[in-house]
Amino acid sequence: KNQVEQSPQSLIILEGKNCTLQCNYTVSPFSNLRWYKQDTGRGPVSLTIMTFSENTKSNGRYTATLDADTKQSSLHITASQLSDSASYICVVLLQSSASKIIFGSGTRLSIRP
Amino acid sequence: KAGVTQTPRYLIKTRGQQVTLSCSPISGHRSVSWYQQTPGQGLQFLFEYFSETQRNKGNFPGRFSGRQFSNSRSEMNVSTLELGDSALYLCASSVDRGDYNEQFFGPGTRLTVL
């Protein structure tokens, strides 16, 4: 069964600290993996998109890694800021089509001052 | 470029009513997808439209329908509303980047069914 599992479910860290969010998937055939940030009550915003051949991609303080062999991805946030408080959703696409899309349940990140 | 816009942003309906939500994609984007997001089920795919044709459909009952106009604007309709239809409905427009389609989400319409 195609699944995307994220951990932890929620995380609280102090402002300025680093953190790493995990995403494990059992999706085949794999097309690409995306990390989205979603503020409460808003639409998701794309952070990174990685295809099979990419194993790391950065977007400012966000760095995503992908291990296609172990089917694991991580999102590392450095020097966290209060504005990083949001849900982070891992999404895997089977094909380049919106319908073949599997969403993780997200990690709720809270940054404390 | 303006982003994806959705109207209305908030909506309250009662059981049995029907509702129509609207989505305007980013200029030049021809693909529009709709998603339902609830605390219990997370994000779920509803359907995708491309050049006025439904290209893909998720596992939702026939009460959920949609359409796309020649200007790529899309509408989603839900008939005979149920309490469980309360959710954030997200629309996304996408553009082909070669290896993948890049999606841009709108702010969503928060539907509450009483």
Image: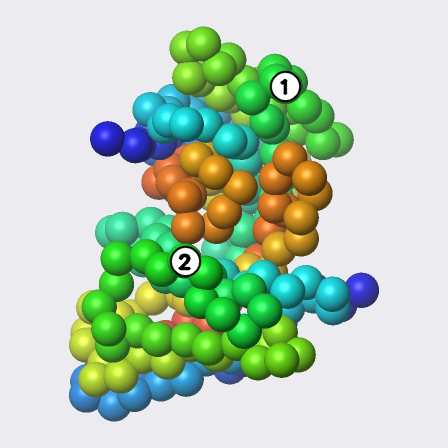
Secondary structure of the residue carrying tag 2 is strand
In this orientation, which residue lies closer to the viewer: B79 or B5? B79
Secondary structure of the residue carrying tag 1 is loop
Q: How crowded is mark 2: few (under 14 residues within 10 Å), some or many (20 or more)?
A: some
Image height of A65 relative to B94, above or below: above
**Residue sitting at the far right:** B1
Residue ID for mark 1? A54
Judge whether residue A56 can be spotted in this image.
yes
Tell me the amino acid under the disc marked 2: Asn
**Residue sitting at the far bottom:** B17
> What is the quadrant of the N terminus of chain A in the image?
top left
Tell me the amino acid under the disc marked 1: Glu
Image height of A39 relative to A17, above or below: below
Image height of A74 relative to B57, above or below: above
Q: Given this view, does label 2 or label 1 mark the residue nearer the observer?
A: 2
Residue at x-position 59% and y-position 69%: B51
Residue at x-position 62% and y-position 55%: B94
Type of colouring: rainbow
In this orientation, which residue lies closer to the viewer: B16 or A11? B16
Picture coordinates of residue B72, whole percent (x, y): 62, 74
Picture coordinates of residue A103, whole percent (x, y): 39, 41
Total labels: the figure holds: 2
Residue ID for mark 2? B56
Q: Residue A91 carries which label?
A: none
Chain under numbered label 2: B
Q: Distance between the residues labelled 2 and 1?
A: 28 Å
Q: In which quarter of the image is residue B56?
A: bottom left
In this orientation, which residue lies closer to the viewer: A102 or A37? A102
Pointers 2 and 1 in contact (C-beta within 8 Å):
no
